[in-house]
Image (cartoon, helix red, strand yellow):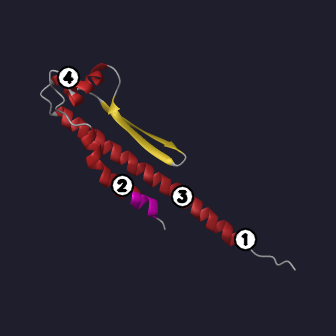
Amino acid sequence: MSELFDASQLTTFGDVLLAKGVARRALISASVKKGAQNVKNSIRDDLKGSGNKAFRSIPITYTVSETPGRITAEIGPTKGGAGSLVNIAFFGTARGGGTHRFYEHGEEELPKLAEYVARAAVEGF
């Protein structure tokens, strides 16, 4: 004997979960973007304090990329022009240099970013 049941509640529940997933991904993306902006600003502030005028003009940018299951941010100097000096500013040469921090700014931001992403991931549950 077959019994009929109303699946509308399941459909509604599925729609709610899907909407929350989209909203959650947007919150996580915004968190990654904010973290990338913070790292960019920290690097720029570090370079602005340089005694070398050319280092002060190194442009720093970031891009956020989204693929299924992954949101990434790439932060660094623009290619060419003043951006070509970045290796000397951050890593130095045989004659010295390398007085500016690069990776450390990302390491400092990581705990805050992880907290924001975790909060965004569970928001709504």
In depth, the one of 67 and 11 nearer the eye is 67
What is the CA distance from the residue labelled 4 to the residue labelled 1?
Answer: 68 Å
Q: Which amino acid is tagged 2? A: Ala
Q: Residue furthest left?
A: 51
Give the vertical position of 122 relative to 84 (above or below). below
- The residue identified by callout 2 is 114
Query: Circles 3 and 2: CB distance less than 8 Å?
Result: no
Closest to the camera, between mark 4 and mark 3, is 4
**Which segment did they paint magenta?**
118-123
Identify the residue under disc 1. 7
Magenta portion: prevailing SS class: helix
Gap between marks 3 and 2, in whole Å? 18 Å
Most foreground residue, 6 or 115 = 115
What residue did someone put label 3 on?
21
The part of the image, by quadrant, that contains residue 120 is: bottom left
Q: Label 1's element?
A: loop
Seen at 54% across and 58% down, the residue is 21
| Residue 85 percent across, percent down from the top left | 25, 23
Mark 4, other Cα within 10 Å: few <14 / some 14–19 / many ≥20: few
> Most extreme residue toward the right, as rendered?
1
**Which quarter of the rendered picture does the N terminus lie within?**
bottom right
Cα distance between the residues tagged 3 and 1: 21 Å
